[in-house]
């Protein structure tokens, strides 16, 4: 039997055939959500070959595989073979919705795949898999981290998606945004008015050494130093959880000492700008982020507040 599968049919077909079986997959590129999308959370182990060297595979997805599968990486692999005992799918679909090349860039590509249970074809595919396996490099957590910078560079080189809703864009291109300097700041108390007044006086007197980029800024006291050139999405859990808006740090973040404490300023911005694109948080998204503020707070190092990269918050936001 040979059956032609479309891009829409392929994940469900692979998911069904993988359930309860050992797999032998040689699939070059893996993107966010691949493990769940093709049903590997329902498989019983096996061997998987990917291509980490290309920078086109999400390292986080490969880390999900390591506890349950033997994994290797082959720098010249471009094929897409999904195989279990008695069945195989071969074609053009990578192991994610947007998994080819730069994650998210290829959504909408038209794929063609063949499913077969022909015994002779399956034997040939096994021989081909075994040859690739012998050539490939074994993967553990150290190897995954070795290639993470390659993936980050690849994602950073991608053009941003069209501007608009920030959360909608993140849902469509999670890997792209995970590599942008976007952070959540979360706190449980406001800076006291006397301290704010003292900082404002120092700003007015020019004691920051750099003229603020805007008259609107937030005060942060007793926080770790902020990263340079970063975007901050601020949420608080004080009387009630709320989303407060967007701020920006610069190449020389504004830091001063106030009564022995480190005080920093982050300058308000109406939107996040990446390249020529602008991403805003609308009222609906602001309400959604406020609803997640307590969960974001719980994810900080001591559960009492701090700064978290967007990549650490995506799971809380339901973005994989």
Image: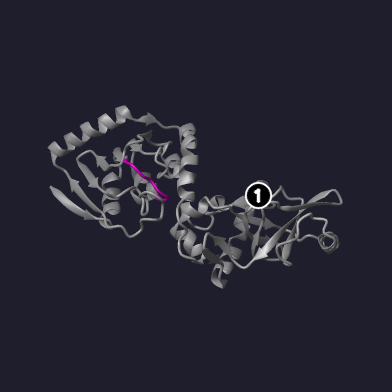
Residue 6: give x, y in percent of width and height. Answer: 24, 56
Q: Is 239 on the left-hand or right-hand side of 258? A: left
Q: Is 152 on the left-hand or right-hand side of 207? A: left
Q: How is the image coloured?
A: one colour
Q: Give the farthest residue toward the top.
A: 134
Residue 44: give x, y in percent of width and height. Answer: 34, 39
Say which residue appears at 67% left-offset and 51% top-offset: 251
Residue 30, magenta (yes or no): yes
* Residue identifier under label 1: 227
Q: Can residue 45 be seen? A: no
Q: Give the farthest residue toward the bottom.
A: 283
Using the image, determine if residue 143 lies above or below residue 219. above
Which is more toward the observer, 212 or 267?
Answer: 212
For residue 23, which quarter of the picture?
top left
Q: Is 9 on the left-hand or right-hand side of 280? A: left
Residue 252, magenta (yes or no): no
Say which residue appears at 46% left-offset and 41% top-offset: 150
Say which residue appears at 61% left-offset and 51% top-offset: 308
Residue 37: give x, y in percent of width and height. Answer: 36, 51
For the record, the magenta segment spans 27-33
Quick one: label 1, few (<14), some, or many (20+) residues within 10 Å? some
Q: Is 102 on the left-hand or right-hand side of 268? A: left
Q: Can residue 203 be seen? A: yes
- In this rendering, the count of numbered labels is 1
Label 1 element class: loop
């Amino acid at each position: 039997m040979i059956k032609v599968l479309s891009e829409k049919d392929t994940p469900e077909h692979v998911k069904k055939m993988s359930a309860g079986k050992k797999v032998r997959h040689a699939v070059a590129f893996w993107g966010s959500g691949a493990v769940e999308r093709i049903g590997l959370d329902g498989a019983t182990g096996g061997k998987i070959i990917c291509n980490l060297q290309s920078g086109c595979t999400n390292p986080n997805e490969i880390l999900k595989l390591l506890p349950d599968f033997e994994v290797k990486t082959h720098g010249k692999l471009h094929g897409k073979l999904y195989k279990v005992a008695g069945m195989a799918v071969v074609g053009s679909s990578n192991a994610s919705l947007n998994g080819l090349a730069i994650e998210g860039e290829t959504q909408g590509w038209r794929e063609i795949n063949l499913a077969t249970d022909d015994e002779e074809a399956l034997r040939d595919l096994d021989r081909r898999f075994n040859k690739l396996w012998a050539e490939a490099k074994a993967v553990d957590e150290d190897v995954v981290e070795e290639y993470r910078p390659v993936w980050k560079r690849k994602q950073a080189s991608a053009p941003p998606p069209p501007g608009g809703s920030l959360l909608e864009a993140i849902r469509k291109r999670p890997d792209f945004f995970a590599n942008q300097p976007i952070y959540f700041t979360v706190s449980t108390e406001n800076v006291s008015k006397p301290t704010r007044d003292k900082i404002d006086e120092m700003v007015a007197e020019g004691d920051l050494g750099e003229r603020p980029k805007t008259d609107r800024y937030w005060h942060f006291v007793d926080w770790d130093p902020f990263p340079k050139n970063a975007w901050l999405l601020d949420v608080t859990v004080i009387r009630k959880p709320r989303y407060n808006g967007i701020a920006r740090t610069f190449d020389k973040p504004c830091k001063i000492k106030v009564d022995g404490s480190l005080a920093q300023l982050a300058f308000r911005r109406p939107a996040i700008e990446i390249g020529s694109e602008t991403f805003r948080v609308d009222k609906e998204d602001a309400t959604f982020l406020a609803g997640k503020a307590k969960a974001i707070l719980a994810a900080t190092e001591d559960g009492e507040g701090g700064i978290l990269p967007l990549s650490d918050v995506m799971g809380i936001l339901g973005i994989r």
